[in-house]
Amino acid sequence: MREINELIDVDDPAWPFLLEELSGTDVPVEVLPGDAGMGPASLLQLQVSARSNLGGIVLNCGGLLVDSGWLRIFGSPSGADLEGLPGLAEINSMPSMFDPAWRPGEGLVVAHDVLGGVFALNGSSPREAGRPGEPGEIVYYAPDALGWEALGAGHSAWLSWILAGGLQEFYSGLRWDGWRGEVSVLNGRQALSFFPPLWSAEARQDLSATSRRAVPMAELLSLSRDSCLQFDGADPGFLGAT
């Protein structure tokens, strides 16, 4: 086990380089203020160093809101805002005190999108967890397909892809006229519920004709899991605690 000073006091921390990348992107990104105590505690529990983008985000900020909050990348937010973006520790049900035996299990949830999609960093045995991809690879739970897909990239490459504008193509067909206005008024714990649902033939035919309402993210993730179980009996597993 590495002590906290070994994780923080590194020669080449990722955060300054990430800030440069953020300042140079055309993608709208809001950097939320972080918690000076929660950041190091989460870093210690994860046993990742400040050399990584994951470690840099957890240590230095409360998360990243991408595209007016369409994508929420979790960090260590300050305060106890019940409507604010939850932290990586909360989302992954980390212990309140350091526990060397704790592991993220099926995978570490690193981001949610407003549709109820989940980005997770694969654990050591994705096959046993019923997930695609390799250990340490980012996978995505797609609410329109009710299943996981591998993205072929680790956390740092995934983040660079986002800042290079990759979300525009990734969500092609899942954005409608006026989506930014609907998304920007949601709080950090809300998502959009669609009727008919995203996986339906009706939504696939004409997404703009669906009705949409703000719901708690926890409600949407629970509904998505129930739909998986109902249709093919496959449990998608842990999608994040909200």
Image (cartoon, helix red, strand yellow):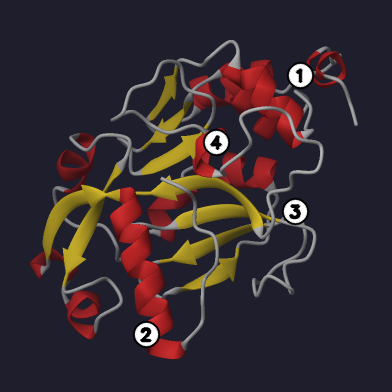
In the image shown, does 168 or 203 lie closer to the viewer?
A: 203
Tell whether label 3 touches label 2 (CB within 8 Å).
no
Q: Mark 2 vs mark 4: which is more N-terminal?
A: 4
Closer to the observer: label 4 or label 3? 4
Circle 3: residue type: Gly
Q: Residues within 10 Å of mark 4 (few under 14, many from 20)?
A: many
Residue 52 seen by the camera: no
User: Tag 1's secondary structure?
Assistant: loop
Q: Position of residue 221 (x, y in %)?
A: 37, 60
Q: Mark 1 vs mark 4: which is more N-terminal?
A: 1
Task: Please name the residue that numbered disc 3 is placed on.
Answer: 136
Tell whether label 4 touches label 1 (CB within 8 Å).
no
Residue 88, numbered label: 4
Find residue 37 and report its image quarter. top right
Q: Mark 2 vs mark 1: which is more N-terminal?
A: 1
User: Tag 4's secondary structure?
Assistant: helix
Find residue 138 and report its image quarter. bottom right
In the image shown, does 223 or 176 lie closer to the viewer?
A: 223
Q: Position of residue 164 (x, y in %)?
A: 52, 41
Closer to the observer: label 2 or label 1? 2
Task: Please name the residue that numbered disc 1 is placed on.
Answer: 13
Q: CA distance from mark 2 to mark 4?
A: 29 Å
Circle 2: residue type: Gln
Task: Please name the residue that numbered disc 2 is placed on.
Answer: 230
Q: State the residue at coordinates (51%, 76%).
A: 235
User: Tag 3's secondary structure?
Assistant: loop
Closer to the observer: label 2 or label 3? 2
User: Tag 2's secondary structure?
Assistant: helix
Circle 4: residue type: Leu
Residue 11 in the figure: left or right of residue 120 = right
